[in-house]
Amino acid sequence: MRVTIITVCYNRKNTIEKAIKSVLEQNYNNIEYIIIDGNSKDGTKEIIESYKDRISQYISEPDKGMYDAINKGLKLATGDVIGLMHSDDEFFDRKAISRIAARFENEANIDGVYGDGVYVSNDNDERLIRDRIGGVFNIKKVKEGWLPLHPTVYLKKSIIEKHGLYNLDFKIASDTEFLLRYLYKYRIKMSYIDSYIVKMRMGGMSTSFKRAFEVLQEDYKIYKYHGLAAMETVFLKKTIALKQYIAH
């Protein structure tokens, strides 16, 4: 089974190398790695190019934002299964992709998998800020504001071709719309891996406290768009998130 991993980035020279290394150091040997850069100006491109001989496909050009870049990667992907590695993040350990591939091979009828993740401090990736335990999937949880952690989600290429790319009408939380469309609207078959998949740094587009209100507004529009009780569901979603922060 071929697994495609897509990284999109723009001006991420301080974190991009860790993201790249965490993909290249996976112990699974059938990985297609695609990087889509938005024509970075800060030295990011030079770091990426130093690994170019180990990257399957690399594009650096202006785009319309993160989700446009992800869509470019999805259109290029040739793997049986596709997932993301954000430029601020890294895999939890070297066996993450092996566990994902094994689940697909052992459960042939599933459309996707997801697992657990942790958020770490932007300046110290050993300091845990938030613990995201996915738990077993059911549609009731989705209606109440739960969604799997986006970077732990891996889907079959065939299911993405069937149900579509990221909606560019949403600039900050299109991943929420994408997951709701797949899990709530189309009811795809998901399998939970009870294991950590990723470490995510606080301060990215979706985790920045400064942009929390904008995300809240967009979440409201997305839940309403999918016919859910938007205000109630978004409130429950934020309550779930607050419970996941780790006291230090």
Image: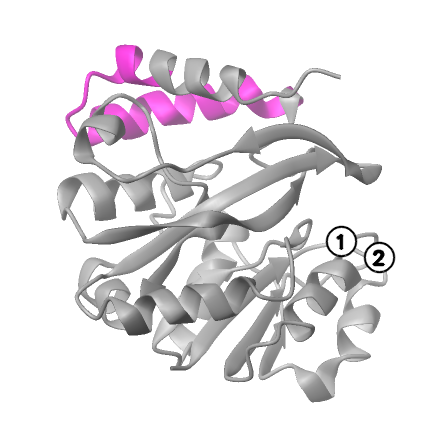
Main SS, magenta residues: helix
Tell me: residue 139, above or below residue 179.
Answer: above
Pick the front one: 142 or 214 = 142
- The segment highlighted magenta reads 210-234
Determine the residue positioned at 69% across, 55% down.
10
Question: Where's residue 247, x and y in %?
Answer: 69, 15
Q: Secondary structure at mark 1?
A: loop
Tell me: residue 169, above or below residue 210.
Answer: below
Q: Is residue 184 left or right of residue 47?
A: left
Quarter holding the C terminus is top right
Tell me: residue 42, above or below residue 115.
Answer: below
Determine the residue positioned at 82% across, 70% down.
47
Task: Mark 1 vs mark 2: give the one in front.
Answer: 1
Image quadrant where residue 120 sits:
top right
Q: How many marks?
A: 2
Q: Which residue is mark 2?
A: 42
Q: Which residue is mark 1?
A: 12
Question: Where residue 154 is drawn, which disc sits there?
Answer: none
Determine the residue positioned at 31% across, 25% down.
221
Question: Where's residue 62, x and y in %?
Answer: 61, 62
